[in-house]
Amino acid sequence: MEIPFAESARSTVGLEWELMLADAETGGLVPAAPGILQVLDGGEKITAELLTNTIELTSDPRERIGDAIDDIRRRVEAVRNQADKHGVKLLSSGSHPFAKWQDQNITEKSRYRTLIDRAQWWGRNLMIWGIHMHVGVDDQRKVMPIVSQLTNFLPHFEALSASSPYWAGEQTGYASNRALVFQQLPTAGLPWELPDWAGFESYVDDLIRTGVISEVTELRWDIRPAPRWGTIELRACDSVSNTFEFGALAALAQCLVEWLSRRLDAGEQLEPLQPWYHRENKWRAARYGMDVEVIVDRGGRELKVTDHLREILPQLEPIADDLGCRAELAGLHTILDLGAGYQRQIAVAQRGDGDLTKVVKHLIAEFDAERPLPVR
């Protein structure tokens, strides 16, 4: 089957952010999305998600990360104005520290009901929140090589964004429990190694013909082509608690795609890691977060993810200058110094004698401050 890949300006970005709606007093999740969305005219930019405790915000396609983050800020304010009237606070992370799936409501949309009907217990357990980052690609022939090579950096995104250490009130021992919950869906997880666009079309044709999916958007890979938009979409990240971290991760995504695109333009053959290394790296990053040692080349060299990031960031800085995201990319150093979201959540819980409502309040405070906050 033929899958057209839309025209997209090179290395433009589009951002998506899933937000939780919580009771201002208790911190518990509330099914307030339908009431808020009924009054807002957000079109495709402020929408419902799988659960009625969630609202998703989307930026416009932008050349600069800062402009995309400004779009998100404006939509946050629109949602916040309505949420305040309902006694609801906004927050975000990969999971809610103590909410349980049995207490949540599914949004009444046929595609969500289909998902739950097929996935059953795992589908009902999808109390997870993420950020998605689209980056434009100017040539369809580049798409699968870039997807393949970007998978080398999946554990870096996973570690930097990890913010789901708690699940239904229990500390899981994982930095990103969300990463492992989400991959239980039949078409989620690591992307398959496909050599070119024709290979991708053949793969999608197989799945549609056998009833696995009905259309291409039902592929839920951690990194996937988005043919409708002419982009590559990174979906591996836990939802971060503030726009500062979101901007830093989006800048890393934009710079990496542009870096790989330039290497392809120069005729370089990009060589991905072995699939078994990808699988191991993903699990390690979900388990150990910022303390993970990742396999960084085909020879099996291992480096702590923080050291590897410090090794590659100087190579990306000139690209960030060209793209106008040098300030946002520099935000990665703040995450490296201050720690990722899961580390701050655990520190808050430890200082609060295990009281997870204090973790929720900290997440709300970071959301409102638009940056990570030191734990004191």
Image (tube, rainbow, N blue to C red):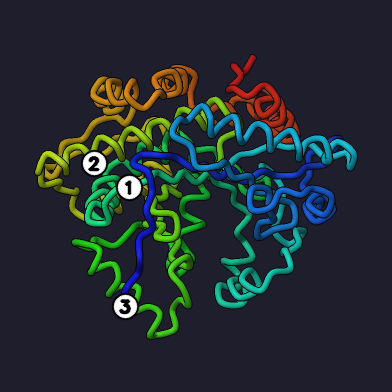
Place residue 60 in its image quadrant: top right
Say whether disc 3 or disc 1 marks the residue closer to the N-terminus: 3
- Mark sitting on residue 1: 3
In depth, the one of 230 and 94 nearer the eye is 230
Q: Secondary structure at mark 1?
A: loop
- Mark sitting on residue 137: 1
Say whether disc 2 or disc 3 marks the residue closer to the N-terminus: 3
Marks 2 and 3, Cα distance to the nearest angstrom?
A: 26 Å
Residue tagged 2: 261
Q: Tell me where residue 48 appears, x and y as whole percent.
A: 69, 56
Marks 2 and 1, Cα distance to the nearest angstrom?
A: 8 Å
Q: Residue furthest top?
A: 376
**Vertical placement of 67 versus 178: above or below?**
above
Q: Tell me where residue 240 appears, x and y as whole percent.
A: 56, 35
**Vertical placement of 202 versus 246: above or below?**
below
Say whether disc 2 or disc 1 marks the residue closer to the N-terminus: 1
For this view, does 30 lie left or right of residue 219? right
For this view, does 172 lie left or right of residue 268? right
Q: Secondary structure at mark 2?
A: helix
**Amino acid found under the numbered disc labelled 2:** Ser
In depth, the one of 2 and 57 nearer the eye is 2
Q: Tell me where residue 349 appears, x and y as whole percent.
A: 65, 29
Image point 38% across, 41% down: which residue? Answer: 285
Packing grade of label 2 (10 A; few <14, some 14-19, many >=20) is many
